Amino acid sequence: MDRKLGGEPDSVVNLSVVEVESLTNDSPNGRLHLLHTDTANTLNPSKENKLESRRETLIMAYRTLGVVFGGLVTSPLYVYPSMPLKSPTEDDYLGIYSIMFWTLTLIGVVKYATIALKADDQGEGVELLVFGSISGGMVDSDSGGRMVDSGSGGRTVDSGSSGMEVVNSVSYGRIGVSSQKLHSCGTFALYSLLCRNMNIGFLSPKNITSNSSVSHSSSQEVAANKSRLGKFFEKSIVARRILLFIAMLGMCMLIGDGILTPAISVLSAMDGIRARFPSVSKSLVEALSAIVLIVLFLLQKFGTSRVSFLFSPIMGAWTLTTPLVGIYSIIHNYPSIFKALSPHYIVHFFWRNGKEGWLLLGGTVLCITGSEALFADLGHFNRRSIQIAFLFTIYPSLVLTYAGQTAYLIRHPNDHDDGFYKFIPGPIYWPMFIIATSAAIVASQSLISATFSVIKQSVVMDYFPRVKVVHTSSRKEGEVYSPEVNYILMVLCVAVILIFGDGKDIGYAFGVVVSLVMLITTILLTLVMILIWRTPAVLVALYFLVFFTMEGVYVSAVFTKIPEGGWIPFAISFFLAFIMFGWFYGRHRKIEYELTHKIDLGRLRILLSDPGVQRVPGLCFFYTNIQDGLTPILGHYIKNMRSLHKVTIFTTLQYLLVPKVSPQERIVVKKMGLKGVYGCVIQYGYADSLSLEGDDFINQVTDCLRKHIQIYRGRLPSNLVEIQEEISYLEEAKRSGVVHIRGKTRFYIGKNCSWFDRIMLAFYEVMHSNCRSALPALGVPLPQCIEVGMLYEA
């Protein structure tokens, strides 16, 4: 399955595909030939192709309205109501508008649309390559390379004369390369970019690489001549842990955004009822908003495929109508509003208001909420489409809308608690109410879907405990739904509305999320400039001084509101970041132990040569977490059980980012050089129902093994008698009974462990004991299932 990702219009980037030719007698030395189709670049496109690319870019820019900018473009609903204004004057409103204009210009246009979008690996987005063997291999991680074979009944792979050979997801081995791009969002994308270019992550550089044919030209220079800062991060484990936690915190802020955006957007939109009917109580509006959100969350399990085509038209209507209303308001209320574009109004504002003006920043920062999406959605849209949509629609729309609101409030200074609906002319009030409510729902849906996507990618990358993820579309891999996450979000959103019904309190909470994410992005982007881009020190200092100072002032202002509601996202984000860090650290330590103590073919041969070890009758599926070798649980099992089944198939489940894997490609088998010992990789897509129950699965595997034996033996100087003997050996084992064995491991936390390991590994064990199993619900009959426990020494 090929999927077009965000890239420059003249570059078509496809998901990594590895085509493996069938093994035939013509294949030299029994080796497989790899044909890579990662990137199809058109170096000299014709004029027709250029026109087509431009048309596609414009269409993509239109689609971004319904996906990328929902939170940003609906901010006029709640910015002014979130400000604790007290008897504001004309000069106060001019100062506030000047602050919002320059915030949108500097942070929106300069920082995100101009600078941050360049951190996208030449238009491909910032991706984190996830490798099966690194993340645990079996189900715990994705292996996105699709292996194609023209044979039937499953593809067969043999090890030739070299002994054991496995499908290796880390190194470019003889069998295949199984890698996948996962586009991470925002701050974590910057962290992944740093890890791929510098050895500052928890994985070594050989395990973090890019399968793109295009990379930053400066990356080679970085490797050859590292800065002092880069060397410091490589040497300091504490600094690397802090950097990882900061990146995780930024990603968790997006989840907090998924709670607050639906709450404040829908509540602000529904508040338009009170503006027309003052007799309607505030409690009724809160109850109606809660009902709308409950219905929205309950509909998540059905997916958005059937209604997503409405998202862009709705947001397009909102983006077009609000600036038109703003222009009308400017003409009728305060035509000279644009004199506030002069920065001296900001200076005068703070000079007059002092501390009160500083505290008002907690509300004005909401004008830039959702700007992180410009950078976070590069995995779905290319840079140029996002820039076109922002610079030519979103940015002017917000500037004109806020100008119109401010012009109205200068004429009616006490209407700031309902700064949006009051400036809507009466004849178009109800149409605008419908558009505003629809836009708020679309913006909420965008953040909810983004939260599901973040959780899913975090689970895939082994940064989050396993939760159930359901794909609601058989055609779009990105449309996912998590029941546990959905209901937690629903409860939290409704609780925020009912407990903190005041828009100001929710605005304070929202301000914490917006300002912290901006500050974290500035810090990480500064590191990218220093360590990867090698930007001149003067420009780095200028960037850091301007944006860190500006956003630091915003953060200091919103932190004063933590007791008034700002603690909500702060607590949620820190708790989620601690969960992510604890889970990742535990998984990293466990995989590190498995790779250090893995069983190779020579070790397995020694274990089986022990006279006390018996080959008992039967067919055994032994599930292994790693592909580059065999799990240490195997050695633990053989030493204690003193036996191994006559036919043992070491099985790894491999998840692919395709809807369904055809039967011809699902099962990959190989001979491992010992009698009755085979390897098997079961590949499945996100729309496949994977079940190992009954004889059907067993028959499929044995059929593949039978064909493999025939091909393998057919290429050696042997006779049909030997082929028949091995097939009979397999059939006899199958008749004797089938058993499925998997490991269940825990850490042994001894006295020699550091206090950090004691805390983090104990926390990991608690999460591991309560999360879903790494093996999906395979339907293996309980009498055939055996779990082998093993303690890993921390």
Image (cartoon, rainbow, N blue to C red):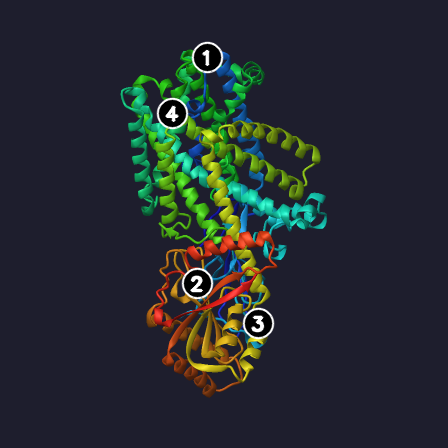
**Residue 136, image x, y percentages:** 51, 60
As helix, strand or loop, the secondary structure at mark 3 comes to loop
Say which of marks 3 and 4 sits in front: 3
Give the amino acid at mark 3.
Asp
Give the amino acid at mark 2.
Gln
Mark 1, Cα crowd under 10 Å, few <14 / some 14-19 / many 20+, is some
Give the amino acid at mark 1.
Pro
As helix, strand or loop, the secondary structure at mark 1 comes to loop
Give the amino acid at mark 4.
Thr
Q: Which one is in front, 436 or 260?
A: 260
Q: Which residue is mark 3?
A: 600
Q: Which residue is mark 4?
A: 321
Q: Earlier in the sequence, mark 4 or mark 1?
A: 4
**Residue 311, image x, y percentages:** 37, 37
Q: Earlier in the sequence, mark 3 or mark 4?
A: 4
Q: Is residue 737 left or right of residue 518?
A: left
Q: Earlier in the sequence, mark 1 or mark 3?
A: 1
Q: Earlier in the sequence, mark 2 or mark 3?
A: 3
- Which mark, residue 335? 1
Alpha-carbon span between mark 4 and mark 2: 49 Å
Mark 2, Cα crowd under 10 Å, few <14 / some 14-19 / many 20+, is many
Q: Choose top left, top right, bottom left or bottom right for residue 30.
A: bottom right
Alpha-carbon span between mark 3 and mark 4: 67 Å
Q: Which residue is mark 2?
A: 683
Alpha-carbon span between mark 2 and mark 1: 65 Å
In what quadrant of the picture does the C terminus appear?
bottom right
